[in-house]
Amino acid sequence: MTSVPEGSLPGALGHFVAVLNTVNSESDAEYVSSLARLRSDKEQVLADASRLLVQPLKGQFALHHSVLLAVGALRDPAALHLLGKVALNAQPLPPKGASAGPEFVEANQLEHEVEDVVQSTMLALDAIDESKC
């Protein structure tokens, strides 16, 4: 599986995310045009979004969030499978790296793991919110 380079998205998905992050209104002509392009290329958009959203966050929370907004903007039943997959992204219990006994854990490592869990949970909630539209 090829990974999406950091900060770049292909085709209609990339264009929509760029517009989404620059315009202030859904009635903006550029937004409307980009949304139409996104919807006309929905199969490729969903494939590109799926490839990105299965990758670890690695500091790309905002990009993942924008992609979820794009998938939700499709307003298409075909998007529900992907949104459901993100929403049901179960977090391991206990969190990965946790052990049964007490041990020394670097504060930085623990902070990073907690941040990943929080961001993954936020994306799951975003996916649920987008699937209601």
Image: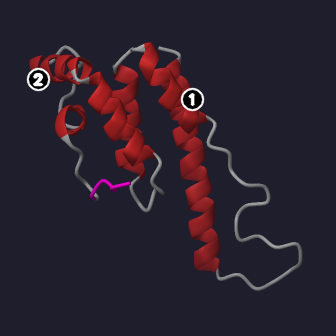
Q: Earlier in the sequence, mark 2 or mark 1?
A: 2
- At label 2, which amino acid type do we have? Glu
Residue 117: percent from left, percent from top: 62, 54
Answer with the quarter of the image where residue 122 lies.
Answer: top right
Residue 2: percent from left, percent from top: 33, 55
Q: Are marks 2 and 1 in contact (CB under 8 Å)?
A: no
Residue identifier under label 2: 30
Image label count: 2
User: Is 4 one of the magenta-colored residues?
Assistant: yes
Image quarter where the N terminus lies is bottom left
Task: Give the mark toward the camera: 2 or 1.
Answer: 1
How much space separates mark 2 and mark 1, taking CA atoms?
29 Å
Q: Residue furthest left?
A: 29
- Taking the spot 22% from the left edge, 51% from the top edge, the residue there is 8
2 versus 122 height, above or below: below
Q: Which residues are magenta?
A: 1-5
46 versus 51 height, above or below: above
User: Is 6 one of the magenta-colored residues?
Assistant: no
94 versus 104 height, above or below: above
Q: Residue furthest right?
A: 101
- At label 1, which amino acid type do we have? Gly
Residue identifier under label 1: 84
- Magenta span: predominant SS is loop
Answer with the quarter of the image where residue 42 lies.
Answer: top left
